[in-house]
Amino acid sequence: MSFDRSIKIAPSILSADFANFGAEIRAIEAQGADWVHVDVMDGHFVPNLTFGPPAVKAFRPHVKTVMDVHLMIAPVDPYIDAYAEAGADILTAHVEAGPHTHRTLQAIRAAGMKAGVALNPGTPAEAVEHLLDLTDLVCVMTVNPGFGGQKFLDMTAKIRALRAMIGDRPIHIEIDGGVDPVTAPFVTAAGADVLVAGSAVFRGGSVDNPAAYGENIRTIRDSAQSIGKVA
């Protein structure tokens, strides 16, 4: 993965047709998705239960771009190797998920993946300040994690603070939660470059009508670029 700060749209397959994941992944990539976002939830760290390593491994042959795996689980460390073996390109752990996030990021990188760290809405930017040299991506949650389709929470001040902390380091700022054509320009103007969108991408489309996915992706991207982002 080469690094650049162009706007990337990462549809969350949590909003896809669960009976047809392979075709859904192929459809969103064909329609312009830059990354594929996989939300892993354990029913403990967050109040929902989704994909384990076998499911992620099953998704992998269908993903030709970047498989961005977001772990909303605790603990994280016992599962790092399993998600590496499943084929994750980026593995993101929550700073709130355990007491040794520095060690977790080291282990993710040692397993051959890019390392991400996520921040819940109530967690300040400063929580990752001393982790940035081990980090390839900071995910800012703009909803409380656990469910798709929630209302966007304004975290633009946190995004700006992170962008200032990051400086010229090659670190992505990803936004997860409530991203749509209305909210996208605010987060990109603050410094974000990766936008996770679930219902806003999949709404109105299907594997039989994938053009709707493309239109949704283009609309979010155009909106995100309409204000421009902080350099």
Image (cartoon, helix red, strand yellow):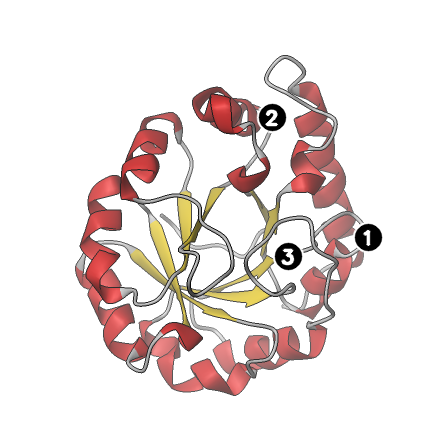
In the image, what residue type sits under mark 1? Val
Report how far apart the C-alphas of labels 2 and 1 lie in the structure.
21 Å
- Mark 3 or mark 2: whose residue is earlier in sequence: 2
- Mark 2 or mark 1: whose residue is earlier in sequence: 2
Q: Position of residue 151 (x, y in %)?
A: 75, 58
The answer to whether 48 is drawn above or below residue 12 in the figure is: below
Q: Position of residue 52 (x, y in %)?
A: 33, 45
Report how far apart the C-alphas of labels 3 and 2 lie in the structure.
21 Å
Q: Position of residue 20 (x, y in %)?
A: 49, 21
Label pair 1/3, CB-CB below 8 angstroms: no
Residue labelled with disc 2: 31
| Local secondary structure at mark 2 | loop
| Local secondary structure at mark 1 | loop
For residue 54, side relative to residue 73 (left or right): left
Tell me where residue 154 sits by quadrant. bottom right
Q: Residues within 10 Å of mark 1 (few under 14, many from 20)?
A: few
Residue labelled with disc 3: 177
For residue 85, side relative to residue 201 (left or right): left
Question: Residue at (23%, 76%) from the top-left corner?
Answer: 103
Please identify, in this view, whether the residue under mark 3 or under mark 2 is nearer the observer. 3
Label pair 3/2, CB-CB below 8 angstroms: no
In the image, what residue type sits under mark 2? Gln
For residue 187, side relative to residue 163 (left or right): right
| Residue 26 in view here | no
Tell me where residue 104 sits by quadrant. bottom left
